[in-house]
């Protein structure tokens, strides 16, 4: 018995080439589509038992898949008769097929494009005949150690950048096959502004787009505790299908949904006046219910930017928020938010989803959007002005000090409930977490449309 594994790239560098929704989609989808075709051919050999990804549901190999990438950048399978050379032959054939599609799309010389694609698309195979207690985890560590970057290529033109052009993509055979027709994609502005025609809609909030990366926490520990690795893959596949429905129902655009990894574009507020945070809560529940565990959780990296902000930079902010902040947060199970306003002002915070302060924060956000409570417009400025005062008082005096700062008649009538909610959030966070509070209040201000 031998194990053969593959890791594929460079996905992150290719995503950075996209400037429009459709271009980011294709940058991600072409890797998923490539993996789908390779795995389908491997399964036709009849002696490939895949540990990762789950591949027993034949519907995922249909050509028409509504453009949703569900195949990760790696696979691991066990076999008795398939050699690493056999896999390489399939990879070479699929690289040639991809190059032909790109050459036809951009109307360039097929031989030159093929040479470019075979160098650009980085695929590393690993073969092992060792006995493993948990092959999925141990072989994954080998794959993790392989860094995939865009190579320096000697070519007449950057054929990948030429291909990742909106008009070229939409007319490509790959796009038409995946959707069944020539596809169309909402612009970033359209995704952000789902209620633009509504007179009571918070117009400013609808000029902002959220880009979200998600990744499972402690998945390795969860896998170790399971008797069947194939059952874990099956549950992750079920989660992917459920997550796709949740993302689309919210009005967001799923770009990649594979295993425990998610990437999607989302409005900050949707048509039902629910905020992005309600979607993150829904996805967290989908994950917990499908994997039937609380040991492994989902962490999120969220960038919120003005719809004209460079898309590739917003994408990078989201990725850094996840892998540089949320995944490094004590206990993980966190949401890291990085927001930049049109004015240039930026703010960020990270908080665990099981933190009592997070529940209070989301409660305030949702109630404000539902217009069930209001806050004074400059509340965060007033609190910031008294930052030093709060830093030097005992925690038990926060409530009374807060009440003394907001003691006008209007505060006791129009803003009473809202102020109590913010004071509760402040008290739960603690006086040493004021910067986090200010960032949360700035996020609330952005979401409520600067009303």
Image (cartoon, rainbow, N blue to C red):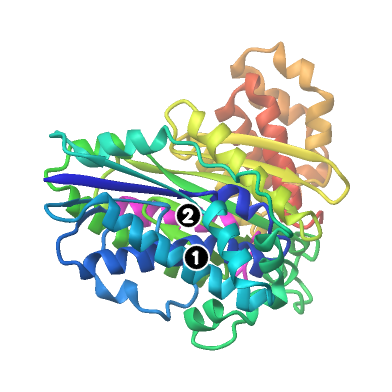
Left or right: residue 284 versus residue 25 is left
Left or right: residue 178 versus residue 438 is left
Left or right: residue 186 versus residue 296 is right
Q: Residue furthest front?
A: 111
- Please provide percent x and percent y for residue 375: 74, 48
Q: Residue at x 43, y 52 (%)?
A: 73
Residue closest to the eye, 301 or 423:
301
- Please provide percent x and percent y for residue 34: 44, 64
Residue 451 sits above or below residue 4 on the image: below
Q: In the rendered image, is residue 274 in sight?
A: no
Residue closest to the eye, 252 or 131:
131
On residue 30, the disc is none
Disc 2 versus disc 1: nearer the observer: 2
Residue 98 sits above or below residue 287 on the image: below
Left or right: residue 50 versus residue 354 is left
Return the residue at label 1.
247
The secondary structure that most of the magenta stretch takes on is: helix
Secondary structure at badge 1 equals helix
Give the residues in magenta: 267-289
Residue 313 sits above or below residue 131 on the image: below
Q: Residue furthest bottom?
A: 181
Q: Is residue 271 magenta?
A: yes
Picture quadrant where residue 398 is located: top right
For the N terminus, the image quarter is top left
Local crowd size for mark 2, using a 10 Å CA cut-off: few (<14), some (14–19), many (≥20): many
Local crowd size for mark 1, using a 10 Å CA cut-off: few (<14), some (14–19), many (≥20): many
Picture quadrant where residue 216 is located: top left
Picture quadrant where residue 437 is located: top right
Q: What is the distance, in whole Å, between disc 2 and disc 1 at their CAs?
A: 10 Å
Q: In the rendered image, is residue 281 in sight?
A: yes
- Please provide percent x and percent y for residue 340: 77, 45
């Amino acid at each position: 018995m031998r194990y053969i594994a593959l890791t594929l790239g460079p996905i992150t560098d290719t995503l950075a080439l996209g400037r429009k929704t459709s271009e980011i989609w294709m940058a991600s989808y072409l890797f998923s589509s490539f993996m789908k075709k390779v795995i389908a051919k491997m399964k036709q050999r009849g002696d490939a038992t895949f540990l990762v990804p789950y591949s027993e549901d034949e519907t995922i190999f249909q050509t028409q898949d509504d453009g949703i990438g569900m195949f990760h950048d790696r696979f691991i399978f066990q076999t008795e008769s398939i050699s690493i050379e056999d896999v390489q032959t399939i990879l070479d054939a699929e690289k040639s097929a991809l190059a032909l599609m790109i050459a036809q799309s951009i109307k360039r010389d097929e031989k030159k494009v093929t040479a470019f694609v075979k160098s650009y698309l980085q695929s590393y195979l690993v073969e092992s005949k060792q006995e493993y207690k948990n092959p999925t985890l141990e072989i994954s560590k080998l794959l993790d150690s392989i860094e995939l970057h865009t190579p320096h290529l000697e070519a007449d033109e950057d054929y990948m950048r030429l291909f990742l052009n909106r008009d070229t993509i939409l007319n490509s055979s790959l796009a038409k096959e995946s959707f069944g027709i020539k596809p169309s994609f909402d612009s970033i502005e359209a995704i952000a502004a789902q209620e633009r025609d509504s007179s009571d809609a918070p117009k400013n909030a609808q000029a902002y787009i959220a880009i979200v990366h998600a990744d499972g926490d402690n998945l390795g520990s969860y896998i170790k505790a399971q008797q069947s690795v194939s059952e874990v893959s099956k549950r992750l596949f079920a989660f992917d299908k459920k997550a796709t429905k949740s993302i689309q129902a919210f009005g967001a655009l799923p770009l990649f949904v594979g295993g425990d990894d998610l990437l999607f574009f989302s409005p900050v507020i949707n048509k039902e006046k629910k905020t992005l945070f309600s979607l993150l809560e829904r996805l967290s529940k989908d994950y917990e219910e499908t994997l039937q565990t609380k040991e492994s959780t989902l962490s999120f990296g969220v960038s919120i930017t003005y719809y004209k902000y460079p898309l590739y930079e917003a994408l990078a902010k989201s990725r850094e928020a996840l892998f540089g902040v949320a995944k490094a947060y004590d206990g993980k199970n966190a949401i890291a938010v990085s927001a930049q306003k049109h004015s240039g002002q930026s703010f960020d915070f990270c908080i665990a989803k099981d933190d009592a302060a997070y529940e209070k924060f989301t409660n305030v956000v949702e109630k404000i959007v539902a217009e069930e409570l209001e806050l004074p417009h400059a509340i965060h400025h007033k609190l910031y002005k008294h930052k030093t005062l709060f830093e030097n008082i005992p925690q038990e005096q926060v409530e009374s000090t807060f009440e003394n700062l907001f003691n006008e008649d209007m505060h006791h009538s129009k803003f009473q409930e809202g102020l109590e909610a913010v004071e509760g959030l402040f008290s739960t966070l603690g006086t040493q977490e004021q910067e986090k509070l200010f960032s949360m209040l700035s996020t609330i201000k952005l979401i409520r449309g600067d009303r």
